[in-house]
Image (cartoon, grey):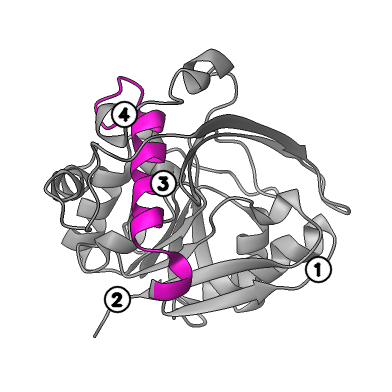
Amino acid sequence: MSAVVTDLVDQVRAGAFGRAATEETISVGFMTRQGVRHDTRGTGYRNHVVSLRVGRAVGSCAVEPGTVDDDLVYDCVGATVDALLDHPVLAVRVAALDAFLMAARPHEQHATDNVTIDPGTSLEKSLLRAGHVVDLLGAGRGQRVLVVGVVNSLLHHLRQRGIDYRPCDLRGGTTEWGEPISNDADLTGCDAVLATGMTLGNGSFETLRAAAVEAGVPLVMFAQTGSAVLPRLLGAGVTAVCAEPYPFFWLDGGPTVLHRYREAR
């Protein structure tokens, strides 16, 4: 885990959030597997997500398709959060920490604002969500944003606002507009970073956070993975978070909620 996340785990174990990790157990563990290709879009993608439940809270961590099997997740059921914070699989550690923190610090009570995404098609909801995420950047026309974890709806809003971007994703490929996607998160010439919470689960978050701090640029996170973890890192290199806990917008055509956090100034 990232150094700042390791510090957060230490706080959890020390009882800083008013709950004992040794007494909180996982009641439900499950995998969500999804494939999508929005209307009018030329490309699609898949998502696999590990989710663990503590009380009313569900913590989640996205993983690369096929890398985590069901039995590994089912074996987490009945385990304490404290035990899972030492699990050999990073995604399980992140999901357990996420569930614990969401139970201890519910988004509805702690977010800067809570935004409802209206009912709609998968594409309509994707675009609505993306607009609320991009608003957190505070970037203007002519500026450049490093986008880590390419979501075409986010790029759509950046293009609409005249904001340049450098798309980066471990999967590579091209954007909806045929632009090459780099797998090198190079901040050179960038005025801000917009990154997915998946960086927590694939081990790249600390490198990205440290680079943003060194460059003195804002780091805005859009987080289905670690939606309750990343808000705890505001002021430690993270500038703002758009937190979206399970169930995610792509699972339901009805209204869903985003919880936005901004660093205190």
Residue 91 at x, y percent in the picture = 41, 31
Comparing marks 3 and 1, which lies closer to the viewer? 3
Q: Looking at the figure, which quarter contains the N terminus?
A: top left
Which residue carries the number 1 mark?
119
Q: Amino acid at mark 1?
A: Pro
Q: CA distance from mark 1 to mark 2?
A: 29 Å
Residue at image location 58% in from the left, 50% down from the top: 246
Q: CA distance from mark 4 to mark 1?
A: 36 Å
Q: Is residue 101 magenta?
A: yes
The answer to whether mark 4 and mark 3 are in CB contact below 8 A is no
Instruction: Write the start and end of the magenta stretch as one range.
Output: 84-109
Q: Amino acid at mark 3?
A: Ala
Residue at image location 71% in from the left, 66% down from the top: 127
Which residue carries the number 3 mark?
99
- The secondary structure type at the circle numbered 3 is helix
Residue 92 at x, y percent in the picture = 40, 30
Can see residue 184? Answer: no
**Which of marks 1 and 3 precedes in the sequence?**
3
Can see residue 169? Answer: yes
Comparing marks 1 and 2, which lies closer to the viewer? 1
Q: Amino acid at mark 4?
A: Leu
Q: CA distance from mark 2 to mark 3?
A: 22 Å
Which residue carries the number 4 mark?
84
Which residue of the protein is positioned furthest toward the bottom in this rendering?
A: 265
- The secondary structure type at the circle numbered 1 is loop
Which residue carries the number 2 mark?
263
